[in-house]
Image (cartoon, rainbow, N blue to C red):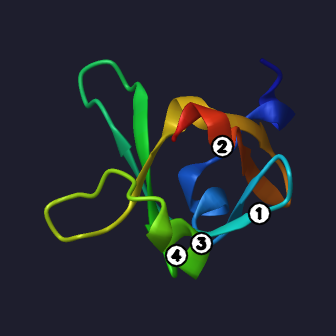
Amino acid sequence: MADDDKKFSKELIGKTVVSKTGKRFGELGDIIFETRSGELIHMLLHNPTSYTEKLELEKDKDGNILIPFSAVIAIGDFLVIAEEDII
């Protein structure tokens, strides 16, 4: 991976999370990762849309919606996820 392909987590926080069909899910609030390996596990959503609320996705102990980081297919102006990987 080239240096300019790397993204720092602070650059991603606050980006809008959308599906590849353009459905808006909310904003990236935080990234949860495995401390030993550094593997990215989940994205924590802030300001989830009403569409996202209806999906009954996994939530943390505080009721925040979690999306598996493995569902991310592109990172740019938005975080694009494959909706079929989370439902």
- Identify residue type, mark 4: Pro
Residue 7 lies in quadrant:
top right
Task: Check disc 1 and give the amino acid type.
Answer: Lys
Asked if the residues shown at circle 1 and circle 4 are in contact, with their CB atoms under 8 angstroms apart, the answer is: no
Q: Residue at x 61, y 48 (%)?
A: 8
Residue in the image at 41% along x and 25% along y: 39
Asked if labels 3 and 2 touch by Cβ distance under 8 angstroms, the answer is no
- Dot 1 or dot 3, earlier in sequence: 1
Give the residue at mark 1.
23
Circle 3 is placed at which residue position? Answer: 51
Which residue, as the protein is rendered here, is positioned at the far left? 61
Mark 1–mark 3 CB contact (< 8 Å):
yes
Q: Is residue 24 above or below residue 68?
A: below
Using the numbered discs, state the Cα–Cα distance from disc 1 to disc 3 in whole angstroms.
8 Å
Disc on the earlier residue, 2 or 3: 3
The Cα–Cα distance between marks 4 and 3, rounded to whole angstroms, is 8 Å
- Give the amino acid at mark 3: Tyr
On screen, residue 39 versus residue 73, left or right, reads left
Tag 2 or tag 4, which sits nearer the N-term? Answer: 4
Dot 1, how many residues are within 10 Å of its Cα: few (below 14), some (14-19), or many (20+)?
some
Residues packed near mark 4 inside 10 Å, few (<14), some (14 to 19) or many (20 plus): some
Residue positioned 32% across, 50% down in the render: 58
Residue 43 at x, y = what percent?
46, 51
Q: Nearer the viewer, residue 40 or 65?
A: 65
Residue that lies at the very extreme toward the front in this rendered image: 54
